[in-house]
Image (cartoon, rainbow, N blue to C red):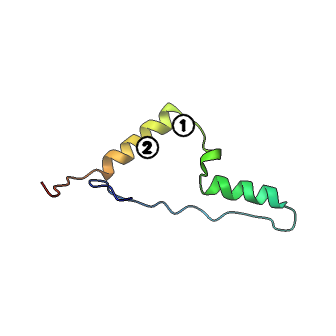
């Protein structure tokens, strides 16, 4: 879904460190879910983290003058 006035961005994360010889399939799936921020594994943000994200969102804002 596209929204007007939203500046899209992407954050490239560090590669996962997976020991395929000792990790179970369930543990691998769990690591992948955390890595892709699956909704069932999202954590509650602290106030400090939330303010940091809000500041980053403010940086991403720009004026949009669409079809008026």
Residue 1 horizontal side relative to residue 61, left or right: right
Residue 46 position (above or below residue 16): above
Residue 29 horizontal side relative to residue 57, left or right: right
Residue at the spot 82% in from the left edge and 61% down from the top edge: 25
At which x and y percent is residue 35?
A: 63, 56
Residue 25: mark: none
Residue 21 horizontal side relative to residue 40, left or right: right
> Which image quarter holds the C terminus?
bottom left
Give whichever of 60, 68 is nearer the camera: 68
Residue 19 position (above or below residue 52): below
**Mark 1–mark 2 distance (CA, rounded to whole Å):** 10 Å
- Give the secondary structure at mark 1: loop
Residue at the spot 15% in from the left edge and 58% down from the top edge: 67
Residue at the spot 16% in from the left edge and 55% down from the top edge: 65
Disc 1 to disc 2: CB gap under 8 Å: yes
Q: Which residue is mark 1?
A: 45
At which x and y percent is residue 4?
A: 27, 55
Residue 63 position (above or below residue 20): above
Q: Which residue is mark 2?
A: 53
**Residue occupying the far bottom of the picture:** 21
Residue 44: quadrant of the picture:
top right
At which x and y percent is residue 39?
A: 59, 47
At which x and y percent is residue 29?
A: 74, 58
């Amino acid at each position: 879904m596209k929204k007007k006035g939203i500046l899209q961005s992407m954050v490239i994360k560090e590669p996962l460190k997976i020991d395929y010889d000792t990790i179970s399939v369930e543990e691998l799936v769990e690591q992948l879910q955390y890595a892709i921020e699956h909704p069932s594994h999202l954590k509650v943000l602290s106030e400090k983290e939330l303010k940091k994200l809000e500041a980053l969102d403010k940086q991403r804002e720009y004026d949009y003058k669409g079809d008026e």
